[in-house]
Amino acid sequence: MSSGLSDILIKDIMTRVLITVNPSTTIYQVSKLMEQGGIGAIIVNDDETHKGIITDRDFAIKIAVNRYPLDTRVQKVASYPLQTINSNESVLVAANMMSAKKIRKLVVVENNKVVGIITSTDIVNQLAKMK
């Protein structure tokens, strides 16, 4: 099964639509964007540079546990630095990276430019198609 995953490139299954916010955006605003977009991760930009990410897991672990007020700036709770992977890497490389780093999302780059995101769900969905 893993040999099949090594044949599939990240760029073939990644999500290309990304929502970005600046570091001063509140966690309430971020949560509304996630709800409206049906997504679990938003990229945090600083001066047009992608710096970090806030995920639905951050809300469950960091925000809820620490009881941050909803007007808290996203820069306080986002994860830095971004964990990235090249779009031409295989899905197996992405899966190994996620496992090693204990994360569920990787930002995808091409020529040092963010072009998408790949999630553990994307990989599981790909596995399900490989019956």
Image: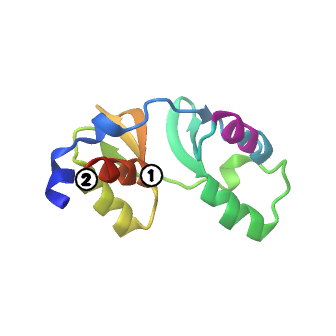
Instruction: Kindly identify the residue that appears in the image at 36 percent across and 51 percent down.
Output: 123
Q: How is the image coloured?
A: rainbow
Instruction: Kindly identify the residue that appears in the image at 43 percent across and 30 percent down.
Output: 16
Q: Position of residue 79 (x, y in %)?
A: 56, 55
The residue to which callout 1 is attached is: 121
Instruction: Kindly identify the residue that appears in the image at 79 percent across and 45 percent down.
Output: 28
Q: How many marks?
A: 2
Q: Position of residue 13 (x, y in %)?
A: 33, 38
Q: Residues within 10 Å of mark 1 (few under 14, many from 20)?
A: few
Residue 60 in which image quadrant:
bottom right
Element assignment for label 1:
helix
84 or 81: nearer the eye? 84
63 or 13: nearer the eye? 13
Tags 1 and 2 in contact by the CB under 8 Å rule? no
Check disc 2 and give the amino acid type.
Lys
Asked if the magenta segment contains residue 102, the reply would be no
Residue 24 shows in the view: no
**Dominant secondary structure of the magenta stretch?**
helix
Element assignment for label 2:
loop
Q: CA distance from mark 1 to mark 2?
A: 16 Å
Instruction: Kindly identify the residue that appears in the image at 43 percent across and 67 percent down.
Output: 102
In the image, residue 116 above or below residue 103: above
N-term mark: 1 or 2:
1
Check disc 1 and give the amino acid type.
Thr
The residue to which callout 2 is attached is: 131
Describe residue 58's horizontal placement relative to residue 128 as left or right. Answer: right
Q: Position of residue 41 (x, y in %)?
A: 57, 45
In the image, residue 88 above or below residue 92: above
Image: magenta residue range: 31-37
Describe residue 18's horizontal placement relative to residue 117 as left or right. Answer: right
**Quadrant of the snapshot with the N terminus:** bottom left
Foreground: disc 1 or disc 2: 2
